[in-house]
């Protein structure tokens, strides 16, 4: 499965907003400039996060985006679902019931056909993936990021302070 690049952009933007400081609104253009991203496309991702309750936004001279809740209350699944939607990655269209290999009737003894083994395996994999994303908060990601790059929060705060 492949997620669109907007998921990565949105996740980084959420961390940047946390590091910039609580309550400080930042425009999509400024967030995009930090990573040299197209502002209009990032804005679409951020608007989806607003609709999902991950961010808030305000217009006007002091407007922009803010985190709607603490990072320990935002999961990776919240962000992925906001941008990619809630649908499972795999959709079984029951091709096993088409063509010359199709079983006669609806299934054994005229009942429903048993679940497709492929659909079942893919569904279990999708569920495991979703559970893993739901178990990880942006706060745990922030902690790992700060261990890898301890100066990142200060560097980001300085950069945004200089372009304010």
Image: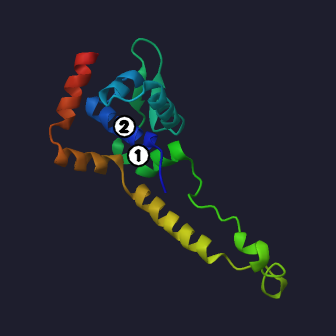
Marks 2 and 1 close (CB-CB < 8 Å): yes
**Which of 118/156 is in front?**
118
Where is residue 52 shown, x and y percent of the image? 52, 39
Number of marks present in the image shown: 2
Question: Residue at 49% of width from left, 68% of height from top?
Answer: 125
Label placed on residue 93: none
Q: Earlier in the sequence, mark 2 or mark 1?
A: 2
Question: Residue at 58% of width from left, 61% of height from top?
Answer: 90
Identify the residue position indicated by label 2 in the image.
14
**Which of 42/14 is in front?**
42
138 horizontally vs 162: left or right? right
Tell me: residue 95, above or below residue 109.
above
74 horizontally vs 123: left or right? left
Tell me: residue 140, above or below residue 116.
above
Tell me: residue 56, above or below residue 113.
above
Disc 2 vs disc 1: which is toward the camera?
A: 2
Whether residue 27 is visible here, answered yes or no, is no
Label placed on residue 74: 1
Q: How many neighbours does mark 2 have within 10 angstroms: few (below 14), some (14-19), or many (20 or more)?
A: many
Where is residue 74 shown, x and y percent of the image? 40, 46
């Amino acid at each position: 499965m492949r997620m669109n690049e907007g998921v990565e952009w949105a996740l980084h933007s959420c961390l940047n907003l946390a590091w910039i400081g609580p309550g400080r609104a930042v425009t999509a253009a400024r967030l995009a400039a930090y990573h040299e991203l197209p502002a209009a496309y990032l804005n679409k991702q951020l608007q989806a996060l607003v609709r999902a309750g991950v961010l808030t936004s305000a217009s006007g001279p002091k407007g922009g985006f803010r985190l709607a809740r603490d990072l320990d209350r935002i999961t990776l699944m919240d962000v992925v679902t906001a941008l990619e939607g809630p649908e499972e990655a795999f959709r079984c269209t029951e091709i096993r019931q088409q063509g010359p290999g199709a079983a006669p009737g609806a299934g054994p003894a005229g009942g429903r056909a048993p679940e497709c083994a492929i659909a079942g395996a893919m569904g279990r994999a999708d569920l495991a993936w979703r559970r893993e994303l739901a178990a990880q908060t942006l706060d745990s990601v922030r902690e790992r990021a700060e261990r890898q790059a301890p100066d990142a929060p200060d560097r980001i705060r300085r950069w945004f302070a200089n372009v304010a």
